[in-house]
Image (cartoon, grey):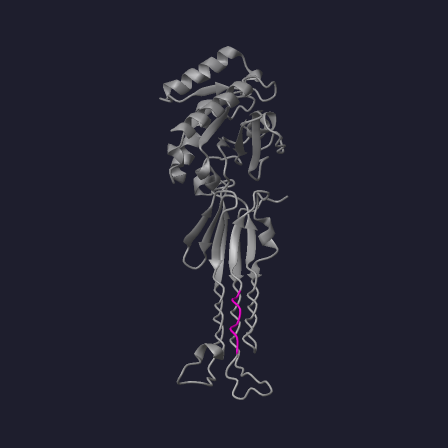
Amino acid sequence: MKFVDEATITVEAGKGGAGCLSFRREKYIPEGGPDGGDGGDGGCVYIEVDSRLNTLIDFRYKRIFKAKNGTPGAGRERIGKSADDLIIKVPKGTLVYVSDTEELIGDLVSDNSKLLVAQGGFHGLGNTRFKSSVTRAPRRTTPGSPGETRELRLELKLLADVGLVGLPNAGKSTLISAVSAARPKVADYPFTTLIPNLGVVSLNTHQSFVIADIPGIIEGAAQGAGLGLRFLKHLERTRIFLHLIDVSKTDPEREPLKDFSTIGNELELYGKGVAEQIRWVVLTKIDLIAPGEVDEIESGLRDTGWIGPIYRVSAATREGCETLMYAIYNWLVEQDKV
């Protein structure tokens, strides 16, 4: 399924039903008086979170959403039927903007969050409403008011506890497939991952967290190189980054310390507080080099001034994976206690 994280839609609430102009007409009851009923309210448009969704792809095929109108009132003081509200389902993590002003009107981050985006029109009044001691036979009614119409921009930012960042072929897809049920595409060419992948890491019955594999960042991504900024925004919601560095030296043009600084620079250039978020370094593919060489790389990272945690893993052999996952889970639990 194609991943879509932005969409523009038009929503139109229903119009209120008109009030009725009617007079009571019954045998033996002269001058029965007004009996026109009110109309019904128009349907509102709401946007609601559906936890089963993880993309905005449905909005590529349907972009206009209209709620139904309220029905007019009728004689004998019968009130028109109000229209049902229209509910538009979106994935958790969707932001809702007004297109022309870019005003953020909703950030749907929890299950079953619901946002009113277009108010339905209010009902018109029948002539019964205007009866008074002075006006015994009013011929006045009001039409229903129109519903709101808006053009909205939807933007999905993935909600994950952990985000994997690193240059292409750093081992992100392999790691997420090793520690979760997610099965992203894995290959030895750049940009194997073209869309974000989410996986749930289950350590025990009640011990789990969500991990996101963000498509590879390259030098210049913040200025639009490679996949550019499109997926960097998904990092804004993650609680902790795992910065994966390939230490296998299978690519002679790649050097671990340079890779480390490249990603750090791109996060700084992107801004929005991403570079200040908690980040752990994970040295990947350690099964392909000698332990002593891994020690040298870790020592080199420390010499750059890095004081954060450094973990070593091999997704192929699963070495270090369980230790890393439990460390992440314990850190998340500690943060929830703060």
Q: Nearer the viewer, residue 11 or 308?
A: 11
Total labels drawn: 0
Residue sitting farthest toward the top: 292
Residue 104 location (% of width, % of height): 42, 52
Taking the image as drawn, is residue 136 in sight? yes
In the rendered image, which quarter contains the C terminus?
Answer: top left
Position of the N terminus by quadrant = top right
- Whole-percent x and y of residue 14? 53, 66
Residue 40 covered by magenta stretch: yes
Specify the segment rendered in magenta.
36-42
- Check if residue 81 falls in the magenta segment: no
Pinpoint residue 243: horizontal percent, then vertical percent.
47, 28
Q: Quadrant of residue 269?
A: top left
Q: Decide: is 223 above or below 164.
A: below
Q: Is residue 233 left or right of residue 174?
A: left
Residue closest to the far left? 305
Residue 175 visible to the viewer:
no
Residue beneath the point at 43% across and 42% down = 223
Looking at the image, is 203 positioned above or below residue 269? above
Magenta stretch prevailing secondary structure: loop
